[in-house]
Image (spheres, rainbow, N blue to C red):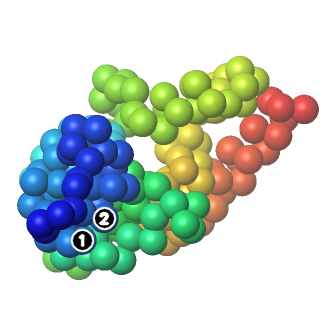
Amino acid sequence: MPGVRHQPLEDADEAHLVRRTAKGDRAAFEELYRRTAPWLAVRLRRRCADEQIVAEVMQETFLAVWRAAESFAGTATGGSAVGWLWTIAARRLVDAFRRRAHHAQPPPEVALDAAPVAAAEDELLATSMDDEVGTALRDLAPELRAVLQAMVLDGLTVRETAVLLGLPEGTVKTRARRARIAMREALS
């Protein structure tokens, strides 16, 4: 727009990029993609070993961001652009698992045995929480940590977590309870 001066894209935070994307700014969308696609792909791969599903979810996620960027409420509601993006991706992943289950294919295995890669939330936990909480989280059994991560950090429901991890809902509830008990004991 003439007369309107924009912050350079490389200096803009992700929320600003989403707001500019909502106005149809393709360069802002491309910058948002460049910044967020690598970590988003890593997070999705940690939850799904099927590269085809990960690729589909990535495409669906960024298409949804392009189409619905104006719905991002932003920091006014306490949310972050990256959190909003992850919520879209997590929901798309659950939808992909549901589609697969509907077509009577066995659910993909969750990549729990993959080489550990530090995800954004792991780095955040390591730097922002005191050592006691971080240690308690790291000491949880991987299957308990996966449920806690999906339900607490990713904000998924029991049903969505069950679909995501390929587990019965009862197992998810049991593991969530066990994880909370273990955390409470470790922190008391």
Among the 4 quarters of the image, the one containing residue 57? bottom left
* Mark 1 in CB contact with mark 2 (< 8 angstroms): yes
Instruction: Locate the C terminus and report the quarter of the image it occupies.
Output: top right
Q: CA distance from mark 1 to mark 2?
A: 5 Å
Which residue is pictured at 13% across the width and 68% down the height?
A: 1
Residue beneath the point at 58% across and 48% down: 148
- Front residue of this view, candidates 1 and 56: 1
- Say what secondary structure mark 2 lies in: helix
Q: Position of residue 14 (x, y in %)?
A: 33, 50
Q: Which residue is mark 1?
A: 22
Mark 2, Cα crowd under 10 Å, few <14 / some 14-19 / many 20+, is: many
Q: Quadrant of residue 128 in the image?
A: top right
- Is residue 75 found left or right of 110 in the rendered image? right
Circle 1 Cα neighbour tier, 10 Å, few/some/many (<14 / 14–19 / ≥20) = many
- Residue 19 — which label? 2
- Looking at the picture, which amino acid does disc 2 mark? Arg
Please, what secondary structure does the residue beneath circle 1 have? helix
Q: Is residue 109 visible?
A: no
What's the amino acid at mark 1?
A: Ala
* For residue 39, side relative to residue 121 (left or right): left
